[in-house]
Image (tube, rainbow, N blue to C red):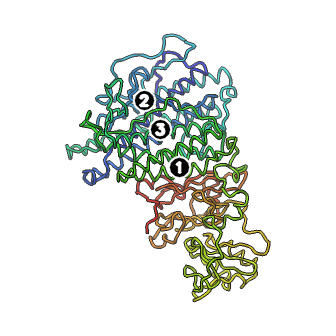
Amino acid sequence: MSVVAVSAPLVTREAVLHALYEAAELEHNLMCTYLYAAFSLKDGEADGLNPEEAAAVGRWRRELIGIAIEEMGHLCAVWNITAALGGTPRFGRTNFPLDPGYLPAGIVVKLAPFTPETLQHFVFLERPSGCAEEDGEGFVYERNYIRGSDGPRLTPMGLNYDTVGDFYIALSDGLRGLVARYGEGDTFDGDPALQLSPNEIDLMGAKPVICLKTAIAAFDAIVVQGEGAPSDSEGSHYQKFVAIRDEFRTLLQKNSAFMPAFPAATNPVLRRPPRPEGRVWLENGAAVAAVDLANASYGLMLRLLGYAFALRGPCAEKALSVDLAIGLMRAVVPLAERAARLPAGPSNPHCHGGMSFVALRDTAPLPPGRAARRYFVERFAQLAEAGEALRTCGDPRARTAADQLTSLAKRVSRGFDVSAPAPNVAPISNDAHTSSSVRTSNGPQAANDAHVSSGAQPSRGAQVSAGSQPGGAPTQDSSVVNGVETARGEKLELLFETKRCIHARFCVTGAPNVFLANVQGPWIHPDAMEVERVVEVAHACPSGAIRYRRLDGVHDETAPPVNLAGIREAGPYAFRGQLQIDGEPQGFRATLCRCGASKNKPFCDGSHHEVGFTATGEPASGKTDMLPTRDGVLAIDPEVNGPLAVRGNLEITSGTGRVVARVVTATLCRCGGSSTKPFCDGTHAKIGFKSANQG
């Protein structure tokens, strides 16, 4: 692959940083255009497609979103290289469409719905160097021009390049020149803890850049995966777009009226444009409301990513910032899809709306600390309020977005402690139990009181007389508060929570005189066995349905020395640790659903037996490097219609106890469909997984 001659070489750190900012903006803009086209696609036979067309369009949507996610990985790689050189990653960009001269003449970037012309434009953008592909009709640049200058300049200027692959080769040469001049150590002297890593996000580009070799490897991966990849590179963006184009043409031959997408606007804008050419002013109130909320969510996503790069990691606050940013994109998708299905307004009666991806005037990272946290809490509350207002329209997509924003608002209010005077920069592995993103609201005593579900102390109020067995009515000398049955003995008070019981039978087999199976009348007898043995049996209960309070002055259950998540064969996850589930202390033991069918989500209720769920309890081992610290709070946030987002020191083990992975963050499948179990692979979105409990 040859490099197109550029107007000036990248010989200074300033020039390289300037080019990296352009690379980040380019990746960012391409990501937005691919998403916009995906949002415009129809949704199966309900939108008038026949079965063959519906299946194809569904694949195309997944491919486009997958490519956009990979562009996000490219963007992350560029930002990490920028940070390695001492720069601050920039998340800003100009609004669509890009003005001529901002990029080379051969690269036109604008928002457009999925059409044959748009698809050809994507093929052209991702073409390898020397490829003869032409640009799509309506995307050819207005006039030819050459950027840059004829000679060297202290002021950095944009380079001229034919393909994106050529641009990255020029950037690689620039880095080699810096190393040759200043040495590797002085070139890459940015703080590596400011970069994003697999501790925060599972993307190809989230690999630490510490030297020339790692920087060049990042550029090469970008080129091979998409931009400028050789024409025979399987799985490249270029090849994926060509495959979609071929299938599109075949379907058009079968049905000349085939229209896979809604007529979304080209370059929609929310205000009357001072330059109306090539833009569509949205006037429909419903479309405006959807786009406004989508844009605001997108803008907050950028702020959170910028904030993550301002925090030294790995730390809980850095990981939470990235999690929240990803969560916002899950709200943006249904909002953008809704906009593409609504009329644009009377001035443009022949097209629909569309998300405009409005860029904030400034997206510089907020200074880490209390003020930034307060900003995020306030902003999420505003978005959640707007989502609730939009919910009244009755569109399922609006309801999905509202649910997601409400969930995120709760997570951020729990996770960002606005009372803390300094940013949380302590690594998770060094002091996770006091980090602001996972601290409890009950203070130091919370660890000892966490065994009481819902945070309420069972009352010794009204005594009841009906006896029971597990899952039945309360015993003669017991009380029930918030679904937790309490049986009091001389030295011990036993608690049983029916909804969390998975019938593992450790209680009735380990202490058959204490827990009586299949009897009428009282079934829990705390004094029928020596107290230490009863405590051991309670600790064996994997679901946490059985807990206890000591009445003899001995301490209650404490957090285990190692946080564990055991993977049960064809069954749930068995967590042990100081658990905080959906922001609430939940004791030290819990079994959480991974089949997707529980009616008591996120907890397991045994539904995996009913639905015939099959999944190995012995997955292959991955990253198993020993963690410096193995305990601390384990925060588990069940995402709306998505996986379990886990933050904290954790060892994931197989059913036989073999270590599968040691992590500080993870997204664990709970829809039952991931091909990379126990980890999420995005299948929940493809199969329409719903996390709301079904009665």
Give the residue pinned by disc 3: 71
Residue 350 visible in rendering: yes
Mark 1 is surrounded, within 10 Å at the Cα level, by few (under 14), some (14 to 19) or many (20 or more) other residues, namely many
**Residue 394 spot, x, y in % from top left:** 35, 53
- Residue 409 is marked as 1
Mark toward the start of the polypeptide (1 vs 3): 3
Estimate how packed mark 3 is, as few (under 14), some (14 to 19) or many (20 or more) residues with alpha carbons within 10 Å.
many
Residue found 49% across the figure and 39% down from its top: 72
Looking at the rendering, which quadrant does residue 377 occupy? top right
Q: Disc 2 residue type? A: Asn
Dot 2 falls on a residue whose secondary structure is: loop
Q: Position of residue 44 (x, y in %)?
A: 30, 52
Earlier in the chain: of badge 2 and badge 3, it is: 3
Describe residue 54's horizontal placement relative to residue 663 as left or right.
Answer: left
What residue is shown with label 2? 95
Classed neighbour count for the residue bearing mark 2: other residues with Cα under 10 Å, few (<14), some (14–19), many (≥20): some
Question: Disc 1 versus disc 2: distance between alpha carbons?
Answer: 28 Å
Disc 3 marks a residue whose amino acid type is Glu
Gap between marks 1 and 3 measured at Cα: 27 Å
Cβ atoms at labels 1 and 2 below 8 Å apart: no
Q: Is residue 632 left or right of residue 377?
A: right
Q: Is residue 199 above or below residue 538?
A: above
Compared with 687, 517 (above or below) is below
Along the line of sight, which residue is nearer the eye, 185 or 315? Answer: 315
Quadrant where the C terminus is found in the figure: bottom left
